[in-house]
Image: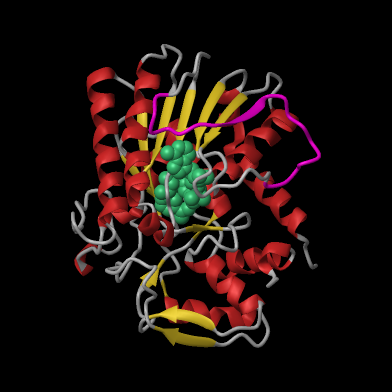
């Protein structure tokens, strides 16, 4: 049966809420500070919390969402007709201390500049959100006796371009990252964000866990996000050949949004303080050429072309990326459920329904 974009979003949130199970009650009556609430992942967190308030929790949770809209947009993901008085969103830049006066029980730090084309454009802002932003939010946690959990969004990019022997990549791999290369503003600031997080755990007992997501995709990504799946989809839906950078042999693994958000909640609620967890999908490592070819099964007549790397894209991209998820399985009970083909079909069906994915 053909699904429309509202059904897809609704079912995705249902899957995440069902996956949370009894752990959802940990949020009853609690306050969550969500940094980066206008971003791709942030808006999914808000959709899940709203659903919890509507259908699951007898005492709702309060969400304080902050964003400086450097790349985010003040648009609701869905359920816009349903006003939840427990969700507040305000402009704030986490690079400066936040004047939050409530008791806060959970902090989710998902503010950052995530897409390579944008972090190349905003390198200093990228560093500030990951370094100063993390420290400011950790300070808030330290001064908050009610704090129960803090989730820092690091990235699989902290591994840089791993040694082929370290693929799939476990959390114990130290990385192969340049401190001065075009990607350093992102990779190195996430690495320092992790360091600051572990110090706050060790010195002040702040219950921090760190997540290293591997290329999350799904409904809600903006057509101009410039990460690979929305970019390929936008081009193919508008009848243009899918532009693959370079020789197209570089590989990635992609995590569908329901698996990703489920894994992030598990990291927040079940992860060991001070430790980092890979969250991803290790089953479908795919080259960019093969990913582009997969579109022919979801967008009739789509074609592929190779193009040189654009100057707006940071050079030195990793050749392979694939997580070892053993630790996430053992500590958190995490396993991905959605394969790439299924996720791609859902994403494209959602994007087809979006005015923004049509050429103007
Ligand atoms: N989505 C992924 O595949 C992925 C993979 C690895 C890591 N991450 C990390 O997860 C986090 C969320 O990713 P996303 O995909 O939602 O990114 P996104 O770019 O869609 O959203 C990030 C949000 O943070 C906001 N922001 C940036 N700097 C800020 C600041 N100083 N103060 C307040 N708000 C600020 C942006 O305006 C945006 O709304 C980011 O830190 C990203 O680096 C994401």
For the C terminus, the quadrant is bottom right
Question: Observer-nearest residue: 239 or 259?
Answer: 239
Q: Can residue 314 be seen in this view?
A: yes
Residue 136, quarter of picture = top left
Task: Examine the structure image and report whether residue 296 is included in the region drawn in magenta.
Answer: no
User: What colour scheme was applied to this rendering of the protein?
Assistant: secondary structure
Residue at the image position 19 percent from the left and 58 percent from the top: 178
Question: Observer-nearest residue: 332 or 260?
Answer: 260
Q: How many marks?
A: 0
Horizontal side, residue 146 vs residue 345: left or right: left
Residue at the image position 19 percent from the left and 65 percent from the top: 163
Magenta part of the chain: 77-97
Against 41, residue 336 (above or below) is below
Question: Observer-nearest residue: 244 or 105?
Answer: 244
Residue 55: % across, % down: 74, 32
Q: Is the magenta stretch mostly helix, strand or loop?
A: loop
Q: Is residue 272 visible?
A: no
For the N terminus, the quadrant is bottom right
Task: Examine the structure image and report whether residue 94 is included in the region drawn in magenta.
Answer: yes
Against 103, residue 219 (above or below) is below
Residue at the image position 74 percent from the left and 64 percent from the top: 353
Residue 94: % across, % down: 42, 32
Residue 77: % across, % down: 67, 47
Residue 261: % across, % down: 53, 45
Residue 311, quarter of picture = bottom left
Residue at the image position 43 percent from the left and 86 percent from the top: 306
Residue 191, quarter of picture = top left
Question: Observer-nearest residue: 66 or 69?
Answer: 69
């Amino acid at each position: 049966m053909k699904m429309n974009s509202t059904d897809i979003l609704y079912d995705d949130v249902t899957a995440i809420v069902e996956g949370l199970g009894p752990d959802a009650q940990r949020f009853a009556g609690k306050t969550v500070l969500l940094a980066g609430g206008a971003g791709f992942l942030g808006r999914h967190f808000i959709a899940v919390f709203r659903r919890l308030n509507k259908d699951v929790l007898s005492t709702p949770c309060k969400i304080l969402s902050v964003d400086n809209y450097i790349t985010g947009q003040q648009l609701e993901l869905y359920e816009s007709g349903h006003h939840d008085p427990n969700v507040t969103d305000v402009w704030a830049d986490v690079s400066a201390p936040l004047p939050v006066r409530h008791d806060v029980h959970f902090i989710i730090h998902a503010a950052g500049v995530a897409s390579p084309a944008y972090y190349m454009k905003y390198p200093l802002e990228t560093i500030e959100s990951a370094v100063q932003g993390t420290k400011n939010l950790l300070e808030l946690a330290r001064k908050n006796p009610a704090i129960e959990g803090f989730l820092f969004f690091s990235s699989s990019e902290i591994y840089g371009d791993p040694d082929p022997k370290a693929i799939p990549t476990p959390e114990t791999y130290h990385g192969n990252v340049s401190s001065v290369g075009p990607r350093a503003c992102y990779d190195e600031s996430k690495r320092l964000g992790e360091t600051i997080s572990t110090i706050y755990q060790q010195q002040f007992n702040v219950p921090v866990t760190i997540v290293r997501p591997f290329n999350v995709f799904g409904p809600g990504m903006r057509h101009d996000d410039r990460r690979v799946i929305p970019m390929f989809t936008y081009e193919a839906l508008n009848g243009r050949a899918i532009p693959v950078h370079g020789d197209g042999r570089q590989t990635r693994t992609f995590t569908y949004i329901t698996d990703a958000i489920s894994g992030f909640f598990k990291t927040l609620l079940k992860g060991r303080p001070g430790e980092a967890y890979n969250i991803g999908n290790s089953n479908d490592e795919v080259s960019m050429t093969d990913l582009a070819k997969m579109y022919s099964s979801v967008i009739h007549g789509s074609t592929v072309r190779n193009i040189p790397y654009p100057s707006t894209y940071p050079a030195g991209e990793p050749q392979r990326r694939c997580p070892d998820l053993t630790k996430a399985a053992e500590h958190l009970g995490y396993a991905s459920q959605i394969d790439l083909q299924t996720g791609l079909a859902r994403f494209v069906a959602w994007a087809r329904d979006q005015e923004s994915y049509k050429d103007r």
